[in-house]
């Protein structure tokens, strides 16, 4: 199973970016997908998560600005980021909890850099 993330880049404060992450490989079911971020010198923190059923979950710092969504047919999760701030600068990682024939595992994408200039 692989997660391939894309969509990062450089944007001015107040701008928008959309991240995508697609899961591929042999698996039965994606339980949940989400996005984390890690700024230089800081720990990796949850940004947003979306389970296969149930409500979405956002970090307080991004509520009202970021929207997570999921296309189950494409095994893809998106993160629409609006009103970006310099403090949103980080490497963004997608994450998925996936059921395979050998069990349920946590998978991570390779990370995509988001840089917000002031």
Image: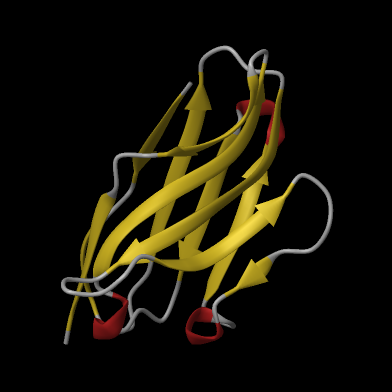
Q: Residue 95: x percent and y percent?
A: 49, 46
Side of 78 where 45 appears, left or right = left
In this view, the residue farthest toward the right is: 54
Which quarter of the figure is the C terminus placed in?
A: bottom left
The residue drawn where x is 79% and y is 63% is: 55
In this view, the residue farthest toward the front is: 102
Q: Residue 71: x percent and y percent?
A: 66, 38
The residue drawn where x is 24% and y is 73% is: 89
**How many marks on residues?**
0
Q: Nearer the viewer, residue 73 or 41?
A: 41
Colour logic = secondary structure
Give the vertical position of 30 relative to 111 (above or below). above
Q: Nearer the viewer, residue 76 or 12?
A: 76
Q: Quadrant of residue 10?
A: bottom left
Q: Quadrant of residue 11?
A: bottom left
The residue drawn where x is 44% and y is 74% is: 82
Q: Nearer the viewer, residue 39 or 22?
A: 39
Give the vertical position of 5 relative to 47 (above or below). above
The residue drawn where x is 67% and y is 13% is: 101
Q: Residue 25: x percent and y percent?
A: 51, 15
Side of 41 where 83 appears, left or right = right
Give the vertical position of 50 relative to 43 (above or below). above
Side of 27 where 87 appears, left or right = left
Q: Quadrant of residue 91?
A: bottom left
């Amino acid at each position: 199973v692989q997660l391939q993330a894309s969509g990062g880049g450089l944007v001015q404060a107040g701008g928008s970016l959309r991240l995508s992450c697609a899961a591929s490989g042999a698996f039965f079911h994606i339980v949940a997908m989400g996005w984390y971020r890690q700024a230089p010198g800081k720990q990796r923190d949850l940004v947003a998560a979306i389970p296969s059923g149930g409500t979405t979950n956002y970090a307080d710092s991004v509520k009202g600005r970021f929207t997570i969504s999921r296309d189950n047919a494409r095994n893809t999760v998106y993160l629409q980021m609006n009103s970006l701030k310099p403090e949103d600068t980080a490497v963004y990682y997608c994450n998925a909890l996936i059921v395979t024939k050998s069990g349920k595992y946590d998978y991570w994408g390779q990370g995509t850099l988001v840089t917000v200039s002031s």
